[in-house]
Image: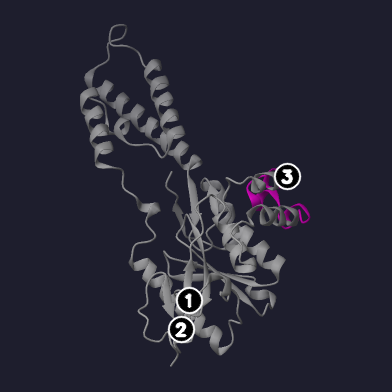
Amino acid sequence: MGPCSKIKPTAKCVPLSDGSGVVVRREIPADNSCLFNSIGYVMHKSKTRAPHLRNVVARQVAGDRTTYSDAFLGMSNEAYCSWIRQPFNWGGGIELSILAQAYSMEIAAWNIESCKEHVFGEESGYTRQAMVIYNGVHYDALAVAASPRANPEEDETNFDPRSKRGKMILAAARKLTTLAHKESAFHSANKKPPASSSATQNGTAKSSGSKATDAKPAADGASTSSAATTNAAAKSARPSAVTRRVPRAAASAAASAAAASDAAAAAATAAAASKLSCGDCGEVLCGSAAAAEHAKATGHQSFVEVAA
């Protein structure tokens, strides 16, 4: 057995089964370009390749309008090319598939939530594979090192996944992902609102004597504003008690119907504005319509809401 055989597996470092090395998680800055810089690390040992790789993706999309149609992208081809070049926009499954093609190499994206990997370029006959790991909102790089404290410059960042050593590397990566899952690394999509926020909402609801629909938190600031506008408009359209007397039962029914309408409008606005992350490939999509198009194009069915 090799020198790493007695190292205890953790969510950041797992030894290969023969002890000849370890699979390590190389952290990438959370700067909205973590996917691109993770790929930059496993391809070039660089954490600053994002601008170049965004351009690689944009050129590929611009040159193949048939594959990358408006329906597939969720926006026009031109708008996407401009959008992906911006440093504050996230990458996901589309970008990983393009980069796998650009480097003629499989890219395995390990999902901490599901403990499974999605291999981009798997059917293209590539003989080498690189690995990244993500938790729904952030990507890091995975590499093979001689030891936990080895110089990152000496990392092995791609390998033959079908060789004996490659299978040991994949087994260690799977173990690392499972340990990360157990440590609850994937939590952002299921964060609960702070207790103080809930108390404030409840207090507001009680003091105003309003229905539960008025006390529900919206998905984000835009949704809150939209819901408030809808409520205000609905209230202004209702007849006042001074100008028109309505029997108590009828007034109650009208109020219930109006509240239901307000809730439906707020829910629709929130659904359209929310960001959803594909649990299979990590693609971040704007709204349920884009998620439906992504599911139709890829067959992926698992989506989680990204925390605002």
Residue at (25% x, 27% y) in the render: 204
- Specify whether residue 62 is painted magenta: yes
SS state under label 3: helix
Using residue 146 as the reference point, say whether residue 189 is left or right of it: left
Residue 16's tag is: 2
| Residue hosting label 3 | 78
Q: Are marks 2 and 1 in contact (CB under 8 Å)?
A: yes
Disc 1 packing (10 Å; few <14; some 14–19; many ≥20): many
Residue projecting furthest to the top: 243
Mark 3 or mark 2, earlier in chain:
2
Q: Nearer the viewer, residue 49 or 90?
A: 49
Picture quarter with the C terminus: top left
Residue 248 at x, y = what percent?
22, 19
Magenta span of residues: 61-80
Q: Which residue is mark 1?
A: 23
* Tag 1: amino acid: Val
Is 93 in front, or is 269? 93
- Quarter of the figure that contains the N terminus: bottom left
- Pick whichever of labels 2 and 1 is earlier in the sequence: 2
User: Sequence-wise, which precedes: disc 1 or disc 3?
Assistant: 1
Q: Nearer the viewer, residue 276 or 232?
A: 276
Three-letter code for the amino acid on which mark 3 is drawn:
Glu
Residue 171, x across and y down, in percent: 46, 81
From mark 3 to mark 2, how far is it between C-alphas? 45 Å
Q: Position of residue 239 (x, y in %)?
A: 35, 13
| Colour logic | one colour
- The three-letter code of the residue at mark 2 reads Leu
